[in-house]
Amino acid sequence: MAENEGRERLYFVDWLRVFAVLLLLPFHTGMMFVRDWFHIQNVDKSAAAELFNGFLNIWHMPLLIFLSGAGSWFALNRRGASGYLKERFLRLVIPLTFGILVVVPPQVYCERIAHGEFTGSFLAFWPHIFDGFYPKGNFSYHHLWFLAYLFTYCVVALPIFLWLRPRLLAPESCAWMKHPLALLALAISPGIIYSVLLVPFHGMQDFLNDWARYFAFLLLFIYGFALFSGGAAETIQRWRGRYLLLALVGALSIKVMEDHGLHPALGYTPHFILWFIYRVFVAWFWILAIVGYGRRYLNVPHPLLTYANEAVLPVYVLHQTVIVIIGYFVIQQTWGVATKYFFILILSAIVTLATYEFLVRRFNVPRFLLGMRRMKN
């Protein structure tokens, strides 16, 4: 199987991407019940949501970036450079544009209404989405930052991919990928980049103040492309138990240090730099462990996977708006925190999937706007 790994699309990659996107539903629901900032928030907080979201924060988006790099390997091999860029534009830029104009504005509207910054209907609010950039203004891509980052990664990394591809297909060039410690060492570069750039650039998912995350994720994207071209996945699978042990110890140690106030202040100190290098290493441990177990147990086809793999991008685009709208009304109720959380989560999942099934999947125009291919006649 190893020799075909770089040429044939693997089912476990799709399964992991589907699971990672589905995890966004409990994560973004939980954001209304944690102390971190979110667009709308419940007055009472949840220790369970804090624990769950803190755990996902370590590795979840890095995993999605890594898997997107793997997807680029398969897409580039199937379509070539020009076809790859065209397909990425249709799957990323079109839904990003549609999302900015249609999907995200209800989130901003709910936030403005909740904070007393606007009164009136959504139709009266919509023209104001062009009144400056968020957070002071209303123009934003919110959770769709991932699509914006990902498209720029595809463009920026394409020359690197074209240079790497023939070399990665040569068995002698991939020998180092089969060494488990060499795979662990790959975390050094994004760790250093992240810790060094985080002091001047510690903003949230924008192209002005988020260069630390941007460049660290770019390296993970390239890693995803490179490691699925040779024998690395086989090594990752064989060492999955050890990687998981490192991941569990790392996540637990981060939690203990944060609970004891050992999180360093922002600044160029050895404590700060080592802390964030360590966090990147722990994220990398989780990526390796999840990929290893995924390859071992999820590399199987299933009709559900075909459906879910097609739905994953529309669900990603739609889910947070559904959560914020439902959450806006639910957090005003006098229910307990757990009741509110699960009500929002379950209803949001139902509404998001129903919207996809009945308003998106069956019609070519919404399919196009949400990055899907046309239906076959």
Image (cartoon, rainbow, N blue to C red):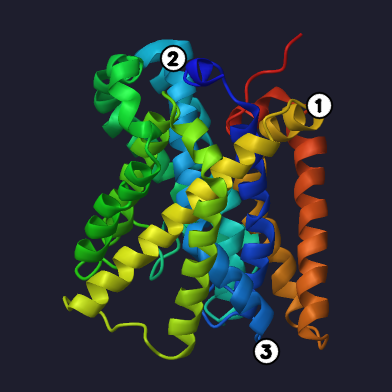
Residue 332's x, y, as percent? Answer: 75, 83
The one of 284 and 105 positioned closer to us in this rendering: 284
Please, which residue is most extreme toward the top here? 377
The one of 197 and 90 positioned closer to us in this rendering: 197
Of badges 1 and 3, the one in the foreground is 1
Dot placed on the residue nearer the N-terminal end, 3 or 2? 3
Which quadrant, please, contains the C terminus?
top right
Residue name at image x 70 percent, y 57 percent: 322
Residue 338's x, y, as percent? Answer: 79, 79
- Residue bearing the label numbered 2: 77
Residue name at image x 62 percent, y 64 percent: 28
The residues tagged by marks 3 and 2 sit, at their Cα atoms, a distance apart of 50 Å
As drawn, 69 above or below 128: above
As drawn, 67 above or below 35: above
The one of 262 and 128 positioned closer to us in this rendering: 262
Q: Tell me where residue 110 sits by quadrant.
A: bottom right
Q: Amino acid at mark 3?
A: Asp
The residues tagged by marks 1 and 3 sit, at their Cα atoms, a distance apart of 41 Å
Q: Tell me where residue 341 sits by quadrant.
A: bottom right
Dot placed on the residue nearer the N-terminal end, 1 or 3? 3
**Residue 32 tag number:** none
Q: Amino acid at mark 1?
A: Pro
- Residue bearing the label numbered 1: 303
